[in-house]
Image: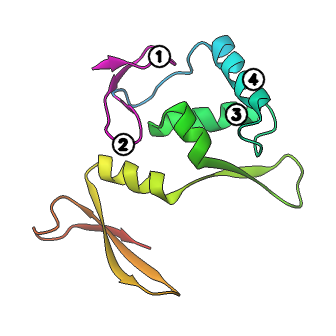
Amino acid sequence: MAKDPTNNEAVQESKSIGPVKSSAVSTIPNIELLLEFCDHIAKSKMFPNLKDKFQVLAVVEYGRELGVKPIMALQTIHWIPKKDTPGAGTLAIQSKVLLALAQQNGIEVVVDKKTTKECQLTFVKGNRHSPRHSIGKT
């Protein structure tokens, strides 16, 4: 076990996306330091879709809840504003991160059908060669 430098919690090391929290619910780390970090990121203009430290904070915290490190979260989680409602919107995460998180949790994604118009996937928990325990399709 290692310590997460952003919040001093014990974490389980992961090979692809970032640390996976050992506790089910984690707390926000030192908010002053976190806001200072987010302010520096916002001022860097490296993530132009994020306008201020509070939007950066939302992305970083969303990523932390999923077990994704801050910079990876900033690169793969995006703020999608609503066109008709200023200030409103939603966070969207890239599918490659969802795939990595699923694989980290022992879920295999099997491509059942792939054409230029559609893709059908089966999410399988456990070994694909044993009897399938399908947990959903998209």
Q: Quadrant of residue 2?
A: top left
Residue 31, visible in the rendered structure: yes
Q: Which residue does the image show at 47% across and 16% down from the upper left?
A: 5
The crowding category of the residue bearing disc 1, from other C-alpha atoms within 10 Å (few below 14, some 14 to 19, many at least 20), is: few
Q: Indicate the amino acid at tag 1.
A: Pro
Q: CA distance from mark 1 to mark 2?
A: 18 Å
In this rendering, would 65 be left or right of 121?
right
Q: Which residue does the image show at 54% across and 55% down from the upper left?
A: 94
Q: Main secondary structure of the magenta part?
A: loop
Q: Indicate the amino acid at tag 4.
A: Asp
Residue range corresponding to the magenta coloring? 1-21
Percent across and percent down for residue 125 are 24, 59
Confirm or deny contact between disc 1 and disc 2 (CB under 8 A): no
In this rendering, would 118 be left or right of 128?
right
Q: CA distance from mark 1 to mark 3?
A: 18 Å
Q: Earlier in the sequence, mark 4 or mark 3?
A: 4
User: Badge 3 is on which residue?
Assistant: 56
Q: CA distance from mark 4 to mark 1?
A: 18 Å
The crowding category of the residue bearing disc 3, from other C-alpha atoms within 10 Å (few below 14, some 14 to 19, many at least 20), is: many
User: Badge 1 is on which residue?
Assistant: 5
User: Badge 4 is on which residue?
Assistant: 39
Q: Indicate the amino acid at tag 2.
A: Ser
Q: CA distance from mark 2 to mark 4?
A: 27 Å
User: Badge 2 is on which residue?
Assistant: 16
Residue 53, visible in the rendered structure: no
